[in-house]
Amino acid sequence: MKSKTFLGLFLTAALVIAAMPALAQLEGRTFPTNKPAGELNVLTDQEKADGWQLLFNGKDIEGWEFDRDGVWKVEDGVIISRNGTTHLFTKKKYKNFILSWDVCAYDVAVPKKRFGNSGVFVRGVKTDSAFPKGYEVQVDPYDIDNPTGGIYGRAPGNLLVENGQWKPEAFFEVHEGKWINQKVSCEDNHFKVWINGKLSLDWEDEQKAFPDAGYIALQNHHPTDIVLFANIKIKVLDKE
């Protein structure tokens, strides 16, 4: 047993050491392929007219705060997070809204076997544990029971999985370390989620499991994950 334990520790250390050049590269100015086109973190005239607001100004994390040890920094208009488990919370709570963001997640320790684990909490509740509570829109792309585009543990998305198997587009369009766009609509207990403009979830929470207003929180799940966010914007649906 001891020899197997030692071997496991050795292999883990070797993977982390091998990943260091990749980590250094992602910390610099080289971003994954298919970086969102155009100028980042700006609103079109139509979006402004429709009531959209930027939640990320493209320069710093003003309006946000993180909960635990970890790194959240901004470079070239992109939020870069490493050293999970950590979450970046809005300082303000939101109730009914549409939220849109671009995200890309990597696990630098095992880049050819598993991609970065992330999620975006809506109506989040801060806790004393490593993870908040709330509705977590799934970014993590390797859990077939909780595929990308669903709400973790409550309502799996139906876009990338069919009859318990991954659809081809799960890997060609979403899973291979690419930037993706996600959007969630929260109206009372009705939730919709989109991936790259395609509806992946349309669900009502009959249990109303969480408060009707809460924080938005970006997640970095694993110590070896690199998670990138940009173009985070919100349209508040509540009437004042």
Image (cartoon, rainbow, N blue to C red):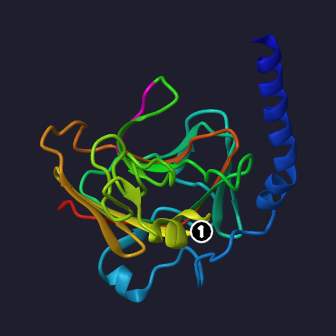
Q: Position of residue 25 (x, y in %)?
A: 82, 61
- Specify whether 83 is left or right of 67: right
Image quadrant where one finds the N terminus: top right
Q: Secondary structure beneath disc 1?
A: loop
Categorize mark 1 by other alpha carbons within 10 Å: few (<14), some (14-19), many (20+).
many
Task: Report the front residue among 135 and 158.
Answer: 158
Task: Identify which residue is drawn at 53% across, 72% down.
Answer: 172
Quadrant of residue 193 within the rendered picture: bottom left
173 is within the stretch colored magenta: no
126 is within the stretch colored magenta: yes
Task: Identify which residue is drawn at 63% across, 75% down.
Answer: 35
Image quadrant where one finds the C terminus: bottom left
Q: Position of residue 147 (x, y in %)?
A: 41, 53
Q: Is residue 59 visible?
A: no
Task: Report the front residue among 122 and 192.
Answer: 192
Quadrant of residue 234 within the rendered picture: bottom left
Residue found at the far bottom of this picture: 45
- Specify whether 50 is left or right of 205: right
- Specify whether 133 is left or right of 175: left
Residue found at the far left of this picture: 206
Q: Which residues are magenta?
A: 123-127
Residue beneath disc 1: 178
Q: Amino acid at mark 1?
A: Lys
Q: Is residue 147 visible?
A: yes
Query: 169 above or below 116?
Result: below
